[in-house]
């Protein structure tokens, strides 16, 4: 089973460029998740009749949004966090910007696992949303992951808006303390790993030079001066079923490229 995740930075723009159709044709995913769709279902001309579509679009037009396209039919789909999680972490408190109407999470339940796609809020250049990340969003997401993991294994994918280690961005020293590479954001990601979730890409690939996002400025993508901020995290007990995890930097159309995992369905069924 091939599962892909891609921050498309506007699905309508990617379709217009022709990159979306070529991506699906080349990689033929069983499931693919999108972040930053910037659209509502039906606004983009997507002709994929063999996929079911589940969208969580932002209330603000042309902003944020997530979606899951899937060949296997999910048992159930949930948009956003459960109400009790939103309440526990005060996500309704808009002191740092209420994220609940921004379409940032979709969870699909399958026979043997849960799949969560998320577009984690950016801390912003002035760090005005750093407290949201540290005190509210990251803990709420971890709570959601652990709650699901108590029922069956979990895969979490998406734009996490953080480079975890110095190996995950081309210029770490110049970016210490900048949004996406603050101690608080990096610790928030580490908390996922400390809770028993696995960074799937690092099961197969070590070192730097492997990035999923590049600025549009200064020919950053041509120079591979990028950041790895798009991830697949997995419950530890999924490890034995994961046969690969990749970054597909040949796919154009966005400032991000897709990332993927591949699962052995026979091993998955035995978990």
Image (tube, rainbow, N blue to C red):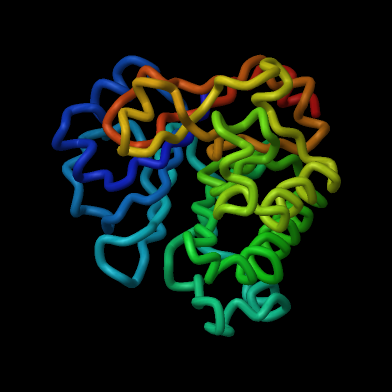
Which x, y percent locates residue 259?
50, 28
Of residue 225 and residue 10, the one placed in the foreground of this image is 225
From where the camera sits, is residue 234 visible?
A: yes
Of residue 94 and residue 266, the one placed in the foreground of this image is 94
From where the camera sits, is residue 110 visible?
A: no
Relative vertical location of residue 54 with respect to residue 102 in this rendering, above or below: above
Relative vertical location of residue 137 with respect to residue 194 in this rendering, above or below: below
Quadrant location, the C terminus: top right
Of residue 195 and residue 43, the one placed in the foreground of this image is 195
Which x, y percent locates residue 24?
32, 24
Relative vertical location of residue 84 with respect to residue 64 in this rendering, above or below: below
Left or right, 154 with reference to 53: right
Left or right, 270 with reference to 135: right
Count numbered badges in the picture. Answer: 0
Question: Which residue is painted at 75% across and 61% down in the image?
Answer: 143
Question: Which residue is painted at 41% across and 30% down in the image?
Answer: 257
When asked about the image quadrant of residue 55, the answer is: bottom left
Which x, y percent locates residue 114?
65, 44
Left or right, 40 with reference to 135: left
Question: Which residue is painted at 71% across and 58% down in the image?
Answer: 184
Which x, y percent locates residue 99?
50, 71
Of residue 201 and residue 58, the one placed in the foreground of this image is 201
When asked about the image quadrant of residue 91, the answer is: bottom right
Left or right, 22 with reference to 137: left
Question: Which residue is painted at 55% across and 65% down in the image?
Answer: 127
Quadrant location, the N terminus: top right
């Amino acid at each position: 089973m091939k599962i892909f995740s891609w921050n498309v930075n506007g699905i309508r723009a990617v379709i217009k460029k022709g990159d979306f159709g070529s991506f699906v044709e080349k990689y033929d995913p069983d499931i693919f998740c999108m972040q930053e769709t910037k659209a509502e279902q039906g606004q983009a001309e997507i002709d994929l009749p063999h996929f079911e579509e589940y969208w969580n679009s932002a209330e603000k037009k042309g902003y944020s949004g997530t979606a899951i396209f899937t060949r296997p039919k999910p048992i159930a789909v949930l948009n956003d966090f459960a109400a009790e999680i939103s309440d526990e972490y005060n996500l309704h408190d808009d002191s740092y910007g209420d994220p609940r109407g921004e379409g940032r999470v979709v969870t699909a339940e399958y026979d043997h696992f849960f799949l969560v796609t998320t577009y984690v809020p950016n801390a912003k250049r002035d760090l005005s949303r750093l407290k949201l990340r540290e005190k509210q969003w990251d803990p709420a997401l971890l709570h959601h992951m652990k709650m699901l993991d108590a029922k069956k294994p979990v895969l979490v994918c998406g734009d996490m808006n953080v480079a975890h280690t110095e190996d995950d961005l081309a210029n770490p020293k110049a970016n210490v303390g900048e949004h996406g590479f603050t101690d608080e954001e990096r610790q928030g990601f580490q908390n996922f790993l400390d809770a028993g979730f696995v960074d799937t890409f690092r099961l197969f690939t070590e070192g730097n030079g492997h990035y999923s996002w590049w600025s549009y400025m200064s020919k950053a993508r041509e120079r591979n001066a990028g950041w790895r901020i798009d991830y697949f995290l997995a419950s530890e007990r999924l490890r034995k079923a994961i046969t690969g995890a990749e970054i597909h930097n040949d796919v154009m159309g966005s400032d991000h490229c897709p990332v993927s995992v591949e699962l052995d369905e026979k091993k998955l069924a035995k978990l």
